[in-house]
Amino acid sequence: MTEPAALARRLGSFDAVVIGLGSMIGAGVFSAFAPAAASAGSGLLVGLVLAAFVAFCNAIASAQLAAQYPTSGGTYVYGRERLGPWWGFVAGWSFVVGKTASCAAMALTVAAYAVPGSSWLERLVAVVVVVVLTGVNLRGITRTAGLARILVAGSLAALAVVVATVFVSGRAEVTRLTDGGVSGGTYGILQAAGLLFFAFAGYARIATLGEEVREPRRTIPRAILIALAITVAVYASVAVATLAALGPAALAATSTPLAGAVDAVGAAWAEPVVRVGAAIASAGALLALVAGVGRTALAMAREGDLPRTLAVVDSRHSVPHHAELAVGAAVVLLVLLTDLRGAIGFSSFGVLTYYAIANAAAFTQRAPDRRSPRALNVIGCIACVALIATLPADAVTLGLALLAAGLVGRVLTVRRRRSPASTV
């Protein structure tokens, strides 16, 4: 049997950082603050700090593992190598399922900001966006990185307009940061952190592209930490600006918090800029997400945990085109069947499960491969499990059901491989 085709190493440090930023600064910053405010009120900022700290622990673990295992697949590979194939499968399945739902959320956010109104028109536009961006990814990772640069620049410019407009308007009030106090207590803050984690969970996309990065042992850890640091600074600025403009209650009540913030300070002229920026940012995140999920599906297919046809690599463009087409088709289906808010909680369940395994895998690394103390891995793993427990019940229930379905599927696959009929 021939070895599966390898991907080409075409990305440098700058491109890796841009793809990480494009994955994180997407629909989350334009949508996740509202449900987080509904859970925690003015405790939203505490939840943001907690989400950022958990993201930091996870980023350290991912960077450390990616340096040792610079190949496609992310924690699916790390779990298999450090903990065993079943743990790797749980990580990979959680990532693929959760991030496919996240892709649908990104596409729906693009449409909601671009063509507000008819829900079916929004869904149609979302389908078109998925098809177009999947086509870009099929042209090769350098095309993905090139478009990601443009989209990241546009989204950062739009967020800068929001923050600057709010603070120079003279109508933002610092006292609104604490209006109404912390609703929901500690549980509400933890739930807000779990929902806000949705907005941070893009840095692993750099690790899932490990087979396409030049000098991966140096580039991947550096790119992950740089992208996360920039994102934390951006999110903190946006969170303070939206709270100062709206207050926790009004922020919780709106589905377009950034557009509401500029409108609340009398800068309605900036609302179209926010809408364009939201569409651009969400498109950038979707672009990188489809690439990342496709690479994880590629790694799982190589091991037989997904159909082996998904491991086929296009020799011309050096992309796993079967996997990316399958991901694109699944996202289109979800766009037609799901809504944005439900996708956020479900995506957080899958991604937090994925990172809990990443921390456990990093804990087992030997001293020569370690870049941080084991205590951070312990804290990161416990924090991921705690945040999962505080997510909305329907998201946890659906996540557990799909995780169980995946495990049953793998049990049947393993039994079929071991049966005498499969060896003749």
Image (spheres, rainbow, N blue to C red):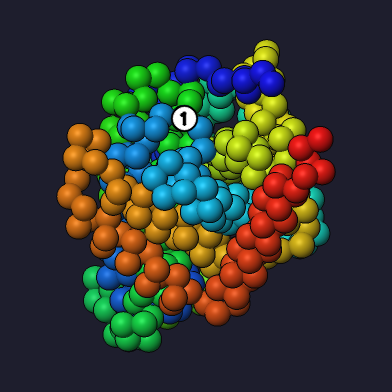
Quarter where residue 292 is shown:
top right
In front here: 344 or 124?
A: 344
User: x%, y% of residue 240?
Assistant: 30, 63
Q: Residue at x 31, y 76 (%)?
A: 43
Residue 214 seen in the current view: yes
User: x%, y% of residue 243?
Assistant: 35, 69
On screen, 85 above or below 255? above
Q: Residues within 10 Å of mark 1 (few under 14, many from 20)?
A: many
* Residue 174 in the figure: left or right of residue 69: left
Q: In the displayed image of the protein, which residue is found farthest to the top?
A: 316
* Residue 52 in the figure: left or right of residue 210: left
In front here: 152 or 48?
A: 48
Q: Quadrant of the C terminus?
A: top right
User: x%, y% of residue 138?
Assistant: 67, 26
On screen, 295 above or below 384? above
Residue matched to label 1: 71
Q: Quadrant of the N terminus?
A: top right
Q: Residue at x 20, y 34 (%)?
A: 368
In front here: 257 or 41?
A: 41
On screen, 110 above or below 394? above
User: x%, y% of residue 326?
Assistant: 73, 40
Q: Secondary structure at mark 1?
A: loop
Residue 277 seen in the current view: no
* Residue 422 in the figure: left or right of residue 414: right
* Amino acid of disc 1: Thr
Q: Residue at x 75, y 48 (%)?
A: 419
Quarter where residue 195 is shown:
bottom left
* Residue 260 in the figure: left or right of residue 318: left
